[in-house]
Amino acid sequence: MQVCQQLVLLTGAASGIGASTARLLAVQGADLALVDRDAAGLAAIAQEVRLFGVKVTTHEADLADGAAIPALPEAVKAAQGRAATLLINNAGVALVGRFDQTEADAFDWLMRINFEAGVRLTRAMLPDLLAAPQARIVFILSVFGIIAPAGQTAYCASKFAIRGFAESLRHELSDTKVGVTVVHPGGIRTNIAKRARVTAGVDAAEAQTGIKAFEVALITPPEVAARRIVAAIQQDRPRLLIGPDAQAIDVIQRVFPVRYWSLINRRLGKMGNLVKTPAPTR
Amino acid sequence: MASIAAHLINPLLRFQVKRKLVKASTAQDIRKAFGAKLPVPRGVRFTEAVIGGVGGEWAEPADGAAPAMTLLYLHGGAYIACSPRTHRPITGGYAKRGVRVFAADYRLAPEHPFPAAVEDGLTAYRGLLDQGVAPERLSIGGDSAGGGLALAVLLKAKAEGVPLPARVVLFSPWVDLLGTGASAVENKDRDPMLDGSKIGDGAAMYLAGADADDPYASPLLGDLAGLPPVLTHVGEREVLRDDSVRLDEKIRAAGGVSLLRVWPVVAHVWPLMHGILPEARHTLDESAAFIRAAGVAPSPA
């Protein structure tokens, strides 16, 4: 679909892939409803994209608060005077720690943001999207929606879940004007690792080593990811892999659907104990 | 990640431009090094014109469309080389994207040293206003030396109470003739086009004895308060990278609105390679959108 003149609801817009995507959509002439919990970051990106002459509204919301989500599309409609025709579910958070180190609360918090928020937003917006002449729902996942490294139980659960949701939804909507795009970025140079919540059971120094090692794997700049995402929307692509790492992981998973982990582990093993098998508990 | 074309073109520039520039000792050498003929976008009409006594050429859509926004463009070339004609890939690129461009053929050094270029730039700017172009529909832009010149013209206009334009767009601007940015040393070898240690030579030819810290020669040192919104593009590997980085910081510190884009891999003033590099087209897309938006968006206070 053409993005010019569309109204886009974009979550996680204050930084990373979200901020870069907002910039690019504004350059292409799309109006923007930007959602994030970081009010200052949201204001900064909004001030910037307004310079490109598009209508921009900001909506501060914590997507972990499931009850607040159904009100969001209404708030966007009231502020923009029309319903969004493009929904980009980009907001995502990460956790540091093995499953046995992760409290149930932290696990649930991640699931609410990475999985449930996307489902709730889709539910709230679907009637308007179906009524539009053309619409699209984009889910920004991760390569961890293709493979599941150790130390990523909650993250992988959320990404596999939203992938299943998105793909089933795409098939349900196949004879409507609503398209669904699933994006699997590889390592994108954003703050997701730096801002990961470290669970109570993890040693702080150990966590820092893991986060540093993880950041080395973040090879693709967010501007490049954003460009690919906008192009995928314009070309109505159902699926997008971003970065050579994502391409490689996709192939390895196909060829070795079970053994992929022992092949990738050597490289990911640099992330310290965080991704190794849990130490036996005494 | 930069495009493959950007990686491929850099060794070529190293051989074709940097090697010649390092050996250049006269204005003639510099003009030759910058003399490449690059592909010009189709669908653009170029017409010679004189605005306020300064020659140059218009770049407009050939289909007769009348863009709402006008851009005064000042080409680069170390204040010594190039012309509106060499920079047609950029001015034509703007015209294709719905911005009408007047490229001023300002006087060049060493025949006409500082401040001749600044005088001509301001004369052309005033000329456009006198022709009835409203300042809120007028923008100013330039690349390299032309970027510094655009900023100098802006500072001079501000000092003389001439209405300021709506937007400013700079590509790899040269705003510090003293060459004090850390990138001048850091990127000396990485920059595929310019050698940081040669900045002083070009500056000396332009200044012809004038002070390099004159704010109309090095506008980075000028009073940058009260400027219209500025969009600056620069390459991460450029020796002039920190001219842009410091400019962005100084405009923000002075309470202005500044957007800085730092692009990986690309060489100095890559929008010239409009027909070759995807980055060039993306940069021009964004720059033209920024200029066109001044016509619809209220300028932020």
Image (tube, rainbow, N blue to C red):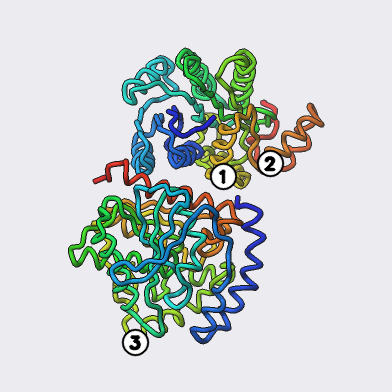
**Image vertical order of residue B169 relative to residue B105, above or below:** above
Q: Is disc 1 placed on a helix, strand or loop?
A: helix
Q: Do marks 2 and 1 share a chain?
A: yes
Residue at numbered disc 1: A224
User: Foreground mark, 2 or 1?
Assistant: 1
- Looking at the rendered structure, the kind of residue marked 2 is Asp
- At a point 49% along the width and 38% down the height, the residue shown is A21
Q: Is residue B236 visible?
A: no
Q: In the image shown, does A256 or A180 lie closer to the viewer?
A: A180
Residue at numbered disc 3: B209
Residue A64 picture location, percent across and down? 45, 22
Residue A264 picture location, percent across and down? 74, 38
- Looking at the rendered structure, the kind of residue marked 3 is Gly
CA gap, disc 1 and disc 3: 45 Å
Residue B83 picture location, percent across and down? 46, 71
Output the chain of dot 1. Answer: A
Residue A97 sits in quarter: top right
> Crowding at label 3, few (<14), some or many (≥20) Cα neighbours within 10 Å?
few
Q: Is residue A41 visible?
A: yes
Give the mark nearer the N terminus: 2 vs 1: 1
Residue at numbered disc 2: A245
